[in-house]
Image (tube, rainbow, N blue to C red):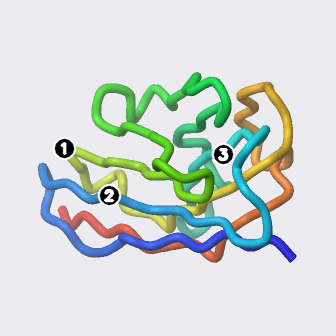
Amino acid sequence: QAQLVESGGGLVQAGGSLRLSCTVSGRTFNNHIVGWFRQTPGVDRQFVANIKWNRGNTKYADSVKGRFTISSGNDNNTMYLQMNSLKPEDTAVYYCAARVGTELRTAPGQYDLWGQGTQVTVPS
């Protein structure tokens, strides 16, 4: 059974950086759209960024453009989110998600494989 595992979250001061990783087991990311979403208490899960694995096309939420970069690893099993210039409003649980397909969809309901989440905290 396929699983996604995130890592790399933590506490960082405003203006700092973190790199999140997402590793898949039980399948590869070939022919997938792989993305990051984030959620804070009482708020629906929000799209952050995604990547079309086989082509490298990417899409970002306006709130993270120019600060976050999504990328694929050298294997077909690991994806990264480099987060720079972090702000308090970036505080959330970050989830990795994957779907088979070619469209860079941004709705959480379009994804059928999810990780357990990793906490990112940027104190104000």
Give the secondary structure at mark 3.
strand
Q: Residue drawn 61% across and 51% down?
A: 76
**Residue 14 placement (x, y as % from top left):** 14, 55
Element marked by disc 1: loop
Residue ID for mark 1: 85
Q: Residue at x 47, y 48 (%)?
A: 74
Q: CA distance from mark 1 to mark 2?
A: 12 Å
94 is higher (above) or lower (below) than 76 = below
Q: Is residue 90 above or below residue 68?
A: below
In front: label 1 or label 2:
2
**Amino acid at circle 3:** Val
**Residue that carries the numbered disc 2 in the rendered image:** 19
Instruction: Give the camera-side residue of 46 and 70.
Output: 70
Marks 2 and 3 sit apart, C-alpha to C-alpha, by 16 Å
Residue 31 percent coordinates (x, y): 79, 38
State the mark number for residue 34.
Answer: 3
Q: Secondary structure at mark 2?
A: strand
Q: Earlier in the sequence, mark 1 or mark 3?
A: 3
Q: Please, is residue 113 above or below residue 108 in the view?
A: below
Identify the image quadrant of the N terminus: bottom right
Q: Are marks 1 and 3 in contact (CB under 8 Å)?
A: no
Give whichever of 76, 60 is nearer the camera.
76
Q: Is residue 112 left or right of residue 29?
A: right
Measured in 3D between alpha carbons, the distance from the residue under mark 1 to the one under mark 3, in whole angstroms, is: 23 Å
For label 3, count other residues whose C-alpha is less than 10 Å away and answer few (under 14), some (14-19) or many (20+): many
